Image (cartoon, rainbow, N blue to C red):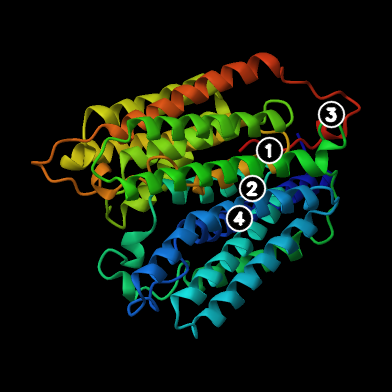
Amino acid sequence: MAITESQVERRYVRHVRRMGDAFDAVTAFFGAAVAGVTLFLPVTFSSIRESTPYQITNLWDSVPRGAAIGVIVAVAVAVLVGTASRPATAWLVALAGTVAQLANHIAGRHVSSADMLTTQNYADAVCAGILLGGLGVAALRKPPLAAGFALGCAGFFVFSDLADFLDIEDDPFDVLETPPSWLIGVAMVLLVLSALRNRSKTGAPDPPPRLSIELPVAPILAAMVLALVILAVTEWLQKQYNNAPAIDHAVDIGLTAAATVFAATAAAMLLPGRDGYGVYLAVSLTAVADAFGYAARPGWSVWVLLALTTVGLLAGARRPSVPLAVTLLAGIAVFAILTSPETNWILFSAGSAVLALTAGYCCAAARPRYAPSGVLALAALYLPTAISVLPDDSKSWHVPDSAAHDTTPGRAALAIVLGSAVGLAVLHHFRPRGRAQPTDPSADEALADI
């Protein structure tokens, strides 16, 4: 059968569109990775060598507080930008956040006090929130872009804090900045090109929830409840350990875990439909990963774990199942209770692979229909947990072979996972997933699944 000129033209247009989407997916990956590093680590270590312990403590305390600020800013930006009909608007907002962050890093090179570094860290978190919010709206409209965005968030989260790549474990005070300016620059250049590529496109704005008044308020309230409650209870738990380090804090940990599930439930109920799935899976995933531990890995393993996270994303997109995601999370928590993976490199490698697959699967199984909901779920990966604030000797960081295995992190993570499972069941029962009507513009261009 002869191929007509119009068919050739259509194939060429589809090919160019796929190539453009692939480029935008790479942009989304690097942008999300920059934001993730920003919210997970202090902006720099190089200027605190001569600082007082009080100043250094303030700098470290600013990291979870900055993450909470970044989550709230990201969702607020996503809500505002999501009403725009031009995709270029979201790309430009993300670009503005990156430019501001680069300027903050350039100015920060002349900072000599840890007090100023704390302020700079907060400014960095705001910039990361702007980047996440704008990029989330741009990326969560199409599956390839959504996959790149989710991989940048969950992928960085899975392969730890780039300690090996940045040589933090060798001498933290030699690290000039996190993320490095060159990584911010790469993301900025990619965002410029993606914004130019999408400058003439138009699209339908994100479909609002059933009550229009919830559009500007409900997702932002959900982000505030989730971030501020988790921040408050984790800081409270940390103070309990500081005030009485020698006693058992099982009740305090239980209260913190319960408050975490309560915050996730409140946030999930504020989000439209079943978009709260992502919130429950995010708080469970962070708790499980903290319980598993963050031992240093070889640099080459980063790419293996990223590939496994991608496999998990594809599997979740093809066969999404929230019960299966919860089962995988519970299994990792039980594994952290029964054994210390770091005492055996084979166990640690296998557990890391399962964690990477599970992280990708959870991102795809969440399936939010509203962009700010997806942004909240992915940004919540950087919030502190009840396990992350435990003293170092209660985690599985470089545990000697002769030391007794502490099951507290695993049991706390399992409690959060089981509490989230109950919340997911309740949400599933009371929030039936609606079907898009033929007249609904979202039926033609629905939000992509993360």
Q: Circle 3 is placed at which residue position? A: 210
Given this view, does label 3 or label 1 mark the residue nearer the observer?
A: 3
Q: Quadrant of the C terminus?
A: top right
Q: Are marks 4 and 3 in contact (CB under 8 Å)?
A: no
* Mark 2 or 4, nearer chain start: 4
* Mark 4 or 3, nearer chain start: 4
Q: Residue at x 26, y 41 (%)?
A: 349
Given this view, does label 4 or label 3 mark the residue nearer the observer?
A: 4
Figure disc tally? 4
Residue at the front extreme of this rendering? 243
| Gap in angstroms between the C-alphas marked 3 and 1 | 19 Å
Give the amino acid type for the residue marked by disc 1 in the picture.
Ala
Question: Toward which corner of the image does residue 402 lie, by quadrant?
Answer: top left
Q: Secondary structure at mark 1?
A: loop
Q: Circle 1 is placed at which residue position? A: 448
Q: Circle 2 is placed at which residue position? A: 145
Q: Quadrant of the N terminus?
A: top right
Give the amino acid type for the residue marked by disc 3 in the picture.
Arg
Q: Answer with left or right where residue 29 lies relative to residue 131.
A: left
* Mark 1 or 2, nearer chain start: 2
Residue at the left extreme of this rendering? 402
* Mark 3 or 2, nearer chain start: 2
| Gap in angstroms between the C-alphas marked 4 and 3 | 28 Å
Q: Answer with left or right where residue 69 lies relative to residue 80.
A: left
Q: Secondary structure at mark 3?
A: loop
